[in-house]
Image (cartoon, rainbow, N blue to C red):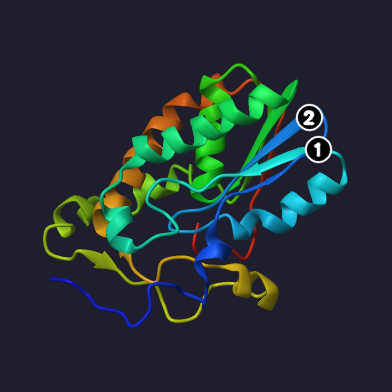
Amino acid sequence: MAIRTQSVWSSPAKPEQLQPFRMRGGVRGCLLIHGFAGTPPEMRGLGEFLAAGGYDVMGPLLAGHGLTPEAMAATRWPDWVRSAEEALAALRRDCEDVFVCGQSLGATLALHLAATHPEVKGVITMGAMASPAYFRDWRIKIIRGLKYAVRWHVPGDEPDLGDPTAVRLLHSYARRPTVCIESLMQLLRVVDRELPQVRVPALIMHGRGDRTV
């Protein structure tokens, strides 16, 4: 069963708005990774702030994102990891010290990079999808079977954000492939096992009013 929606995006966007960004600066670099079904613009504001402070900033576009939900459906978590690792390598070539930062899925990928890449000097997470609470949620247990019956997950009509500016910058798919949600759960289990390997300074942030992550 395929669920159709009128729009690919949760908010209007032009293709050029969804591209990765690079703000060149000094010898310290920061990789900013967007969230699940999202795009780099959601990290641009933070990138501009860091660039003004002298950081070399990169906001990559994860595989399958910024195109169509169908394109995302052809990807899995190793593809998203590969995108983050390639961006990290590119930033590392130009910087002496590299830090990783992300939100939602991007925060989970940042933790993975911090656990598996010794060149990472520090990690910042915002609403990381790495909580054991995910694994206790009964709805997660039905994802594997659900993907055969329901191809798409359609979030609510209104973004769960109180900041109008953040809403305008949220260019995410209006429908998400169920197979990718299952793959996301697999990634969470991988990163959950890797957490003891994160031995660099970490700033962990999570919104008290966050009802999504």
Q: Is residue 103 visible?
A: yes
Q: Which kind of residue does numbered mark 1 sit on?
A: Gly
Residue 23 locus on image (x, y percent): 73, 45
* 200 sits to left or right of 142: right
* 116 sits to left or right of 193: right
Q: Which mark is residue 28?
A: 2
Instruction: Name the foreground residue: 199 vs 47.
Output: 47
Q: Name the residue at 43% across, 48% down.
A: 133
Depth check, mark 1 against mark 2: the one in front is 1
Residue, far top: 118
Q: Which kind of residue does numbered mark 2 sit on?
A: Arg
Q: Is residue 155 above or below residue 105?
A: below
Classed neighbour count for the residue bearing mark 1: other residues with Cα under 10 Å, few (<14), some (14–19), many (≥20): some
Q: Name the residue at 70% across, 26% down.
A: 94
Residues at circles 1 and 2 in contact by the CB criterion of under 8 Å: yes
Q: Name the residue at 73% across, 53% down.
A: 46
Residue, far right: 53
**Which residue in the structure is indicated by mark 1?**
25
Residue 60 locus on image (x, y percent): 55, 45
Classed neighbour count for the residue bearing mark 2: other residues with Cα under 10 Å, few (<14), some (14–19), many (≥20): some
